[in-house]
Image: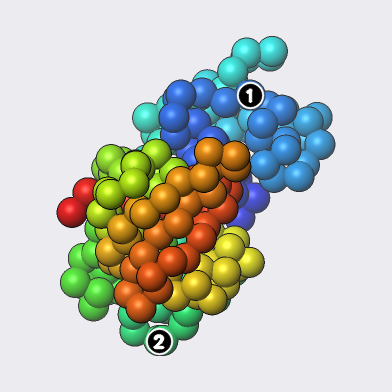
Amino acid sequence: MHSYTEENYLKALFNLSAEKGEVTVNEVSKELGIKMPTVNSMMKKLAEKKLVQYESYKPLRLTEKGKKEAGLIIRKHRLTEMFLVQQMGFGWEEVHEIAEQIEHLQSPAFFEKMDALLGHPTTDPHGSPIPDKNGKMEWLQYEKLSNCKPGDTVKLSAVLQTSDEFLKFLNSRELKLGQKIKVKRIEKFDSSITVSYGKKTDEMLSHTVSERLLVERV
């Protein structure tokens, strides 16, 4: 069993190292808003538990045990978010903080029951993959809306940024997962993109927004 703080470090390491497999102490420090000496101290502790490969001045790597433990924490978080949305009627912008608290419960049976009630979902309300019972996560191959060309028709499948502010912005534009989007124009000056979807015929999205929307071809 790990402490709340240890679990938060493991989750941060997992997310930060998703692309390249390793991460620096400085990156962890910035992600968690914790001073580097404190991070180094925790890395030594996690290394003693065989969860992290740690050497001074070298990148950090989660061990296989560490990856599994981190994956299981993320599984609990994302299952909880899905339960809150599907079963309790919360908006996708309301669930993160609640899931942050529930993910630390040490009750595998509780989360297995939740998984079964949901019908064993593979993604959370934001389109992020849910790790399996062994902490393994299948990374989904989507592309950014910003990489699409005029004439493309795609489906919104996930969002990269899940802050309350961004999700509320998407709500205000009536953009949700599963929405089919047609790319109409892209401005050369600032790469803003004009799209149509649902009842919206000429909706302009900034490059910042289109960079955060993950889509797949339809």
Determine which quarter of the picture holds residue 174. bottom left
Q: Check disc 1 and give the amino acid type.
A: Thr
In the image, taking residue 140 as reference, residue 85 lies left or right, namely: right
Residue 3 placement (x, y as % from top left): 60, 52
Determine which quarter of the picture holds residue 112. bottom left
Identify which residue is drawn at 32% across, 61% down.
181
Instruction: Name the one closer to the observer, 202 or 39.
Output: 202
Residue 215 placement (x, y as % from top left): 32, 51
Instruction: Name the one closer to the observer, 137 or 143.
Output: 143
In the image, residue 35 sits, relative to residue 199, either above or below, namely above
Q: Can residue 73 be seen at all in this image of the molecule?
A: no
Q: Which mark is residue 24?
A: 1
In the image, taking residue 133 as reference, residue 8 lies left or right, namely: right
Residue 217 placement (x, y as % from top left): 22, 49
Q: Quadrant of the C terminus?
A: bottom left
Q: Which residue is mark 2?
A: 88
Identify which residue is drawn at 53% across, 49% down.
192
Identify which residue is drawn at 35% across, 78% down.
199
Crowding around mark 2 (Cα neighbors within 10 Å: few <14, some 14 to 19, many 20+) is: few
In the image, residue 15 sits, relative to residue 75, either above or below, namely above
Question: Mark 1 vs mark 2: which is more N-terminal?
Answer: 1
Which element is circle 2 on? loop
Mark 1 → mark 2, Cα distance in angstroms: 39 Å
